[in-house]
Image: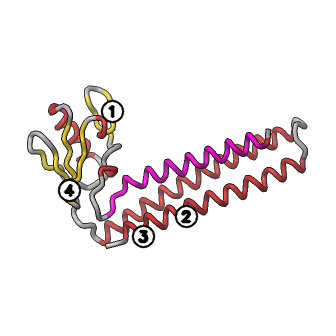
Amino acid sequence: MIAELMKEAEQRMQVTLDVLEEDLTAIRTGRASPALIEKLPVEYYGSTLPLIQLATISVPESRQLLIRPFDPSSLKAIEKAILASDLGLTPNNDGKSIRLNLPALTEERRRELVKVVNARLEDCRVAVRNIRREVIKSLRDLEKEKEISEDEEKQAEDELQELTNAMMEKIEQIGERKEKEILEI
């Protein structure tokens, strides 16, 4: 029973880390990357879809993204979504596709992006701590119901804390790597 709880906790924490890494790919660095806009929500015929489902996204130049919608009528909706996003990019619409020119990041913008990364890291840390708290509560409930001993509960809590510390270390490594990528000129 304890092993199942620990395995579930580890899986949930790993999913949290995976979501963080995926989330951080959308934060732009000096280079153009389709990941920057793939998940951008676009209002299309009454429903919200990620941009990747409405268009192909390519990188014709190192600082430019080219968006070719599958349906030309979605061009305005895509343009509107880009303008509404916090990317700070101005779309160039030629009637068939949209070009996004990525300007070089200023020092001030780099610092802002680092703050965004740090906020996402903190959200991930909170999520991992919440998972730990839920598992500790489950362990204590099992001990109260006399399904496990007090020693087993204490040992499981220590093991859970080690797992949590390992996950926190991974979060820090991910954050440092992304910060270095953003600050790199």
Residue pointed to by mark 3: 180
Disc 1 residue crowd, few under 14, some 14–19, many 20+, Cα 10 Å: few
**Residue at horizontal 61 percent and vertical 51 percent from the top:** 128
- Residue occupying the far left of the picture: 94
Pick whichever of labels 3 and 2 is earlier in the sequence: 2
Q: Amino acid at mark 3?
A: Lys
- Mark-to-mark CA distance, 3 and 1: 33 Å
Is 145 contained in the magenta span? Answer: no
- Mark-to-mark CA distance, 1 and 4: 25 Å
- Can you say whether 161 is above or below 176 in the image? above
Q: Is residue 26 left or right of residue 130?
A: left
Disc 2 residue crowd, few under 14, some 14–19, many 20+, Cα 10 Å: some
Q: Which residues are magenta?
A: 3-29
Pick whichever of labels 3 and 1 is earlier in the sequence: 1
Mark 3 touching mark 1, by CB under 8 A? no
Residue pointed to by mark 1: 48
- Mark-to-mark CA distance, 3 and 2: 12 Å
- Mark-to-mark CA distance, 4 and 2: 30 Å
**Residue at horizontal 43 percent and vertical 63 percent from the top:** 178
Mark 2 touching mark 1, by CB under 8 A? no
Pick whichever of labels 4 and 3 is earlier in the sequence: 4
Disc 3 residue crowd, few under 14, some 14–19, many 20+, Cα 10 Å: few
| Residue 12 rendering spot, x and y as whole percentages | 61, 44
Assign a secondary structure to mark 3. helix
Q: Amino acid at mark 4?
A: Gln
Give me the disc on residue 64. Answer: 4
Residue pointed to by mark 2: 172
- Mark-to-mark CA distance, 2 and 1: 33 Å
**Residue at horizontal 78 percent and vertical 52 percent from the top:** 157
